[in-house]
Image (cartoon, rainbow, N blue to C red):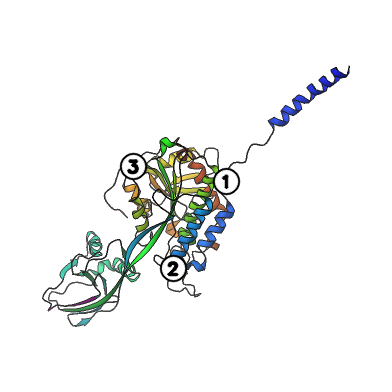
Amino acid sequence: MKPFLLLAGLLATLPAAAQKKATKPAPKAASVSAATVTRVVTTLAADDMQGRGTGQPGGLKAAQFLAAEFKRIGLKPLPGQTGFEQTLTVYQGLTSPVAAVINDQTQSPSQAVAISGQPTLRWTSEDAQPPAIVTIGPEPTERGKMFSYIHPTANTLVFVDTAHTKVFRQLMGYVAKGTTSTEPPKPFSTVFVLGPKPASLSYRISASSVLEPVELRNVVGMLPGKDAKRAKENVVFSGHYDHLGYLKPSPAGDSIANGADDDASGTTAVVALAEYFKKKNDNARPLIFVAFAAEEVGGFGSQFFSKQLDPQQVTAMFNIEMIGKEAKFGPNTAFITGYERSDFGKLLQANLAGSKFKFEPDPYPEQNLFYRSDNATLARLGVPAHTISTDQIPTDGLYHSVDDEVETLNLTNMTAVIQAIAQSASGIVAGKQTPTRIPPLTDDKR
């Protein structure tokens, strides 16, 4: 009887054991680290980063912090690079206020502005080689002509009709911050004067300029792909880490433009996504993570980066810009710029089936956001490069101000957005989805 009872006992335990095995909890799905999100965005937007201004010490400090993060995560430098810092040189120029006398009438500082590639500018109407004289008429179509003289190729005196006073003031604000270019400026100047050109003209105009080369750094790392057949199908995740540096002090005395949302939030997403995909360790395609310099002064970081890659070898670009606050559609939503230009957005949404998150088309087409961030350069080359954002930019009173602080961000929602980007990118990262290309563009619609 004992052998029979033993066998019966063993048989009786089998269903329970099988049941226990069947109810073993499944491995926890990979998730974006909320702790990483909080730590990185708080560090980037801290006062000691001094607003991460282009060419300023705070910008260099931010780049070094991000390079250390890429090293901590275990990213690799791009092929041919020895580190994560991709250096580029730009030229920053600053022209003094203009002293201008037109027909013996001294112009106020708000009536004249100069952009100059010459250390010293001194013009008089008696000069043997006077500047060319240009008139910008009152018609709206004339407005665009002003910007063709921002990069002087000849000495030019431009009279701007007062119908364009608002644009003239914007030009003055642009010049006051200093100009940035990828090439040394030519030894010419443009002087803009607000007002009609006199029928009989005499003038005395003077100003001075300082020009210096500045070394900037993109921060770039990668996760090589697991599928050798897809080695030339790079997927880019990007954000810009630069901001405005110091601004005019607020009534409270704060002069640091911390740029927590713009774009410490997007840069934080790049770091958090790099950490997420490194832990997953199953990306078929190569993943490139980049924090761009100099977006705020003309997108020079992304322009330089785009020249280091063959655009035909970039499958998609996830550019992330200002995701620190809820979108107009509510929590668990974000929008994609240029949604209609490829099926990128539709592919992302397909991977979010069953979740609460929803990607929407850009609700602010009048803002032309598709051409106002670092996706634009690669998009013009045919890459399905789109920006993901949540910012309600028409009503965002903190945009480009000293009040863009971490305390104004919704970090819970921001983490959810990053998690949604990670999940929605799964098909592209795995090589199972390939977004349609964007027709290459030649005209600049920024």
Please report whichever mark, 1 or 2, sits nearer to the chain's N-terminal start.
Answer: 1
Q: Nearer the viewer, residue 279 or 412?
A: 279
Q: Position of residue 112 (x, y in %)?
A: 26, 74
Say which residue label 1 marks: 31
Say which residue label 2 marks: 57
Asked whether the beta carbons under mark 1 and mark 2 sit within 8 Å of each other, the answer is: no
Q: Decide if residue 352 is on the left or right side of residue 343.
A: right
Was residue 128 drawn as part of the magenta stretch in this picture?
A: yes
Separation of residues labelled 3 and 1 (CA atoms): 31 Å
Q: Residue at x 16, y 69 (%)?
A: 133
Magenta-drawn segment: 120-129
Q: Is residue 258 above or below residue 435?
A: below
Q: Decide if residue 179 is on the left or right side of residue 246.
A: left
> Dot 1: few (<14), some (14–19), or many (≥20) neighbours within 10 Å?
many
Say which residue label 3 marks: 312
Query: What residue type is disc 3 on?
Result: Gln
Query: What residue type is disc 2 on?
Result: Pro
> Dot 2: few (<14), some (14–19), or many (≥20) neighbours within 10 Å?
some
Was residue 382 drawn as part of the magenta stretch in this picture?
A: no
Which residue reaches farthest right?
Answer: 1
Q: Decide if residue 243 is on the left or right side of residue 409.
A: left
> Dot 3: few (<14), some (14–19), or many (≥20) neighbours within 10 Å?
few
Q: Position of residue 79 (x, y in %)?
A: 40, 48
Tell me the quarter of the image containing the N terminus: top right
Separation of residues labelled 1 and 2 (CA atoms): 34 Å
Query: What residue type is disc 1 on?
Result: Ser
User: Of helix, strand and loop, which one carries label 2?
Assistant: helix
Quadrant in which residue 316 is drawn: top left
User: Of helix, strand and loop, which one carries label 3?
Assistant: helix
